[in-house]
Amino acid sequence: MGGLVKENSLMSVKEKKTISLHECGHAIAGWFLEHSDPLLKVSIVPRSSGALGFAQYLPADISLFSKEAILDKIAVSLGGRAAEEIFVGKITTGASDDLDKVTKMAYSIVSVYGMNDKLGLLSYQQNNSGEQFYKPYSEETGQKT
């Protein structure tokens, strides 16, 4: 799932501990959140795909998500970063993929799914990469979010 095991990993004990705390942060956050997917596996074994560890979840059989479910997914994703900060005392670059996913989910709540009370039922989904620099809303609307 996460890629082949990286055999020649020269990680220090401190780095291994940070990775394990990060992954535990995801797992614990998911355990306590009502709308999170059930945890299947946690690994702190470095993979050839670049992942130093991962948490794998059983996805729900539904493809419709409420705002609360998306917010819980965001919280689970940030659980690793929070665990690093709380238990290690500093954050690392290990959460960069998590932050990318969280940013996309939060952006989608507001600009794609129409789940923002201030903007209402609007969708500014960009279907092609040529539109990425085009802002389909006014400056005033941009200030509302």
Image (cartoon, grey):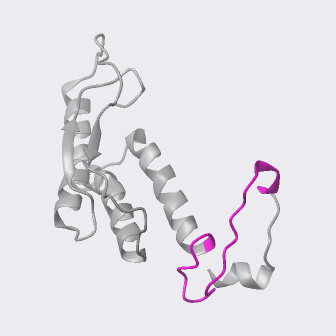
Q: Residue at x 17, y 60 (%)?
A: 31
Q: Which contiguous range is marked in magenta?
A: 111-132
The reply, left or right, for residue 9 in relation to residue 142 is left
The reply, left or right, for residue 10 in relation to residue 31 is right
Please say if 22 is above or below 46: below
x%, y% of residue 33?
Answer: 23, 68
Q: Is residue 119 magenta?
A: yes
The reply, left or right, for residue 97 in relation to residue 23 is right
Q: Residue at x 82, y 62 (%)?
A: 134
Name the quarter where the C terminus is drawn. bottom right
Please say if 118 is above or below 37: below
Please say if 39 is above or below 65: above
Q: Residue at x 33, y 67 (%)?
A: 72
x%, y% of residue 56?
Answer: 27, 43
Name the quarter where the N terminus is drawn. top left
x%, y% of residue 74?
Answer: 39, 62
